[in-house]
C-alpha cells in the first residue's frame, strides 16, 4: 500500500493576500484556484519543486477562515510552536531571497547537526523552520 500526505489546510484571512504572500514572498507555485460557490475557493499552493509530480511535496490548501473559532486560529494553528518545516537544497539562497522579500525571521540562522536552520513567521504569524543541508 502506498500513501502520502497530499495537502495541509492553512487558515488565512483572505485568499488573494495569502496567494500573493506565498507565491511572491516564499516563491511557492499556485497549483489551483477554483471557485467553489459564493465566497469559497479551492486554493492550493506548494513549494516550487515540481509540486504535482513530486510525491514528497505536500501542498497547502489556503482555507479562508469564516467562523469565530477559525478566525481565532489564524496565525496560531500550532499553539506558538513551529508547525511547518520547509526543506531547502540551498539554505542561504532562500534565506537571502526571503529577507529581500520582507519575510520576518525570528532568529539568526544557526547550524545544527541535522541542518542549517532559522525560524521565520509567515504573513499571519505561523512559525516555520527554514532548513538546509548542514555545513
Image (cartoon, helix red, strand yellow):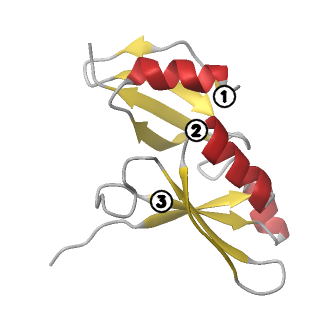
Considering the image in quadrants, where does the C terminus appear?
A: top left
Residue at coordinates 67% horizontally, 27% vertically from top-left? 101
Instruction: Give how far apart the Cα atoms at labels 1 and 2 are.
Output: 8 Å
Distance from Cα at disc 3 to Cα at disc 1: 20 Å
Q: Nearer the viewer, residue 36 or 10?
A: 36
The x, y position of residue 30, in whole percent, is 57, 58
Q: Residue at x 42, y 13 (%)?
A: 110
Occupied quadrant, residue 104: top right
Q: Earlier in the sequence, mark 3 or mark 1?
A: 3
Read off the residue under disc 2.
26
Name above or below for residue 2 compared with residue 99: below
Neighbourhood count class around disc 1 (C-alpha, 10 Å): few under 14, some 14–19, many 20 upward: some
Dot 1 and dot 2 residues touching (CB under 8 Å): yes
Q: Secondary structure at mark 1?
A: loop
Quarter of the image with the N terminus in it: bottom left
Identify the residue under disc 3: 59
Which mark is first along the chain, 2 or 3? 2
Helix, strand or loop for disc 2: loop
Which residue is tagged 1? 103
* 97 left or right, relative to 55: right
Amino acid at each position: 500500500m502506498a500513501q502520502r500526505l497530499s495537502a495541509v489546510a492553512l487558515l488565512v484571512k483572505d485568499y488573494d493576500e495569502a496567494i500573493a504572500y506565498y507565491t511572491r514572498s516564499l516563491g511557492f507555485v499556485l497549483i489551483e484556484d477554483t471557485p467553489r460557490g459564493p465566497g469559497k475557493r479551492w486554493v492550493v499552493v506548494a513549494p516550487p519543486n515540481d509540486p504535482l509530480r513530486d510525491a514528497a511535496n505536500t501542498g497547502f490548501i489556503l482555507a479562508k477562515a469564516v467562523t469565530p473559532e477559525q478566525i481565532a486560529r489564524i496565525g496560531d494553528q500550532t499553539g506558538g510552536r513551529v508547525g511547518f518545516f520547509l526543506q531547502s537544497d540551498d539554505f542561504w539562497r532562500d534565506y537571502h531571497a526571503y529577507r529581500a522579500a520582507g519575510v520576518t525571521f525570528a532568529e539568526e540562522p544557526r547550524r545544527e547537526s541535522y541542518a542549517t536552520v532559522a525560524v521565520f513567521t509567515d504573513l499571519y504569524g505561523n512559525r516555520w523552520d527554514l532548513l538546509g543541508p548542514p555545513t
